[in-house]
Amino acid sequence: MSELSELYQEVILDHNKQPRNYRKLEGANHHAEGYNPLCGDQITVYLKMDGDKIEDVSFVGSGCAISKASSSMMTGAVKGKTKAEAEAVFEKFHQMVTGKPGTPAPENIGKLAVFSGVCEFPSRVKCASLAWHTLRSAMEGRDETISTEAEEAGDDAHPRR
Amino acid sequence: MSQPATHNLPNAAPAPLGWDVRRIRGDFPILRETVQGKPLVYLDNAASSQKPRSVIDRVQRYYERENANIHRGVHLLSEKATEEYEHARSKLQHFINAKEAREIVFVRGATEAINLVAMTYGLKNFKAGDEILITNLEHHSNIVPWQMLCERTGAILKVVPINDAGELLLDEFEKLLTEKTKIVAVNHVSNGLGTINPIKWIIDKAHAKGVLVLIDGAQSVPHLKVDVQALDCDFFVFSGHKLFGPTGIGVLYAKAALLEAMPPYQGGGDMISAVTFEKTTYNVIPYKFEAGTPNIAGTIGLGAAVDYLNSICFGGAAAYEHELLEYGTGLLSEIPGLRIVGTAKEKASVLSFVMGEIHPHDIGTVLDLEGVAIRTGHHCNMPLMKRLGLPATARASMAFYNTKEELDVLARALRKVIEVFG
């Protein structure tokens, strides 16, 4: 597989064209905005939390194929999970996209493995992780806009290579 | 409204009969590199240009054979380094035709030069209600230092609007230029769109009202011959690394009388003539503005870049680049769904574009895998992007070593983008 098709796998292209859960969520009780000032990517994540459980999740926004597909697939990956479970998926996802190229995708990451090619492209790591940082912000109930240039997300800037 | 005089326009130069681009390319070692297994097609010159062998060798020779601090020792190496450093100053003086070498202040780059002017001249002379006039085309480096100055002094930032082609609305400029205006700060060439601004006309209009003008020449000096005396600008700033020289070195040109009256920017060694605990007497210009050990290697390297430009008859570059621009504009216009952003009548060799719903970062990544380096994003032009209603653009920016064949590679790679995302 060429590097190009490894990064832009069919699944990613599909989610880019037809993002899932792309809407403002009626009855959302949490939301957060995410912004990547380097690309201009901008998303809002909506959550309907039932206690600790993510009952429903959606997003709207604009961005590159990687960020859009990542947002779309994030919603699929965390729906029905608890906060702690979603955090654990993010942790694995983050390890994968900032890891050494060639490292096999972590176990139990499921469909999100299609983003394993991102680690070959350090400048695109932030595109892939924006949705997840925004999800975390929404789960924590913070109402400020998170930025990939802020400290919290700063470790994306130096992927381990 | 009187029409701006056409000044320094690329198409005003004679046809580039003798531009031997093959020979020129041979002078730039990096152009032989491969990227992603493909020959490098470097089209990100507005971000930073490549360096000729002579510049690389000059910096190396300085470190291997001449390295010492300047303006200090009596030993031979220090004298040699001082001589080379000051020689570079005189090369830069002649390059932009400044009246005197002491009007050339070495700084880190255009950004530092603008900060220097804002925080010395501006802080000393501006008060609440004074106006600073910039344009919608400015790079963040010609916006933020003035905003910081406004915060400190209560001065007000005014912005000249543009039309959809990316040209300044000159009648609006004339309306915004009032008795409250203290300085006009405008770029010569827009980094985001390539628009060449009619700076001579702007300078004359401003001077007629007694207003000083700072020209951000970061994007113009690599393309156009600049004569600061003919322009009569008060300040002119540019960066070395976009001018085929090293990073971390740049130039603030200012008229000597202005520099004389400005307070120092930073304190330290070299910028003083005498220090006691009671009082310090500052050094003469330009040293008053060059505190601490400067970027000696970078300065000497920048001098070598100017030598190189002189050796290749730099005057012919603008006409050749204009040919590239026209060729590239034609190629890109044929690509379905591609829209060129920035269609000013007077343009430097910059092609900013968008491709429908395809995000510029995805374009950039596909191109990178084809060996083509372009810039994607907001280009440190966030207010400009907002005005254009775009989050970002893709930008191919050419230098005199680029070729039509490279633009063919670009066009092919863009068709591949459509294959993937179309």
Image (cartoon, grey):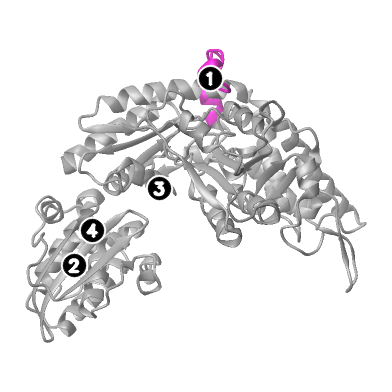
The residue carrying mark 3 is: B383
Q: What SS does tag 1 mark?
A: loop
Q: Earlier in the sequence, mark 3 or mark 1?
A: 1
Q: Are marks 3 and 4 in contact (CB under 8 Å)?
A: no
For residue A73, above or below residue B296: below
Query: Do the residues at pointers 2 and 1 share their chain?
Result: no
Q: Which residue is rendered at x = 51% and y = 44% of the image?
A: B48
Part of the protein shown in magenta: B1-25
Q: Chain of mark 1?
A: B
Q: Chain of mark 3?
A: B
Mark 3 or 1: in front is 1
Residues B168 and B116: in front is B168
How far apart marks 3 and 2 lie (CA) works out to 26 Å
Amino acid at pointer 3: Pro
* Residue A67 badge: 4
- Where residue B238 appears, x then y in whole percent? 61, 42
- Where residue B145 appears, x then y in whole percent? 56, 54
Mark 1 or 4: in front is 1
Secondary structure that dominates the magenta span: loop
Q: Chain of mark 2?
A: A
Amino acid at pointer 1: Ser
How far apart marks 1 and 4 lie (CA) works out to 49 Å
Residue B143 part of the magenta segment: no
* Residue A45 badge: 2
In the figure, residue B161 lies in which quadrant?
Answer: top left
Mark 3 or 2: in front is 3
Q: Please state if B273 lies on the left or on the right of B22 as rendered.
A: right
Residues B396 and B407: in front is B396
Residues B149 and B10: in front is B149
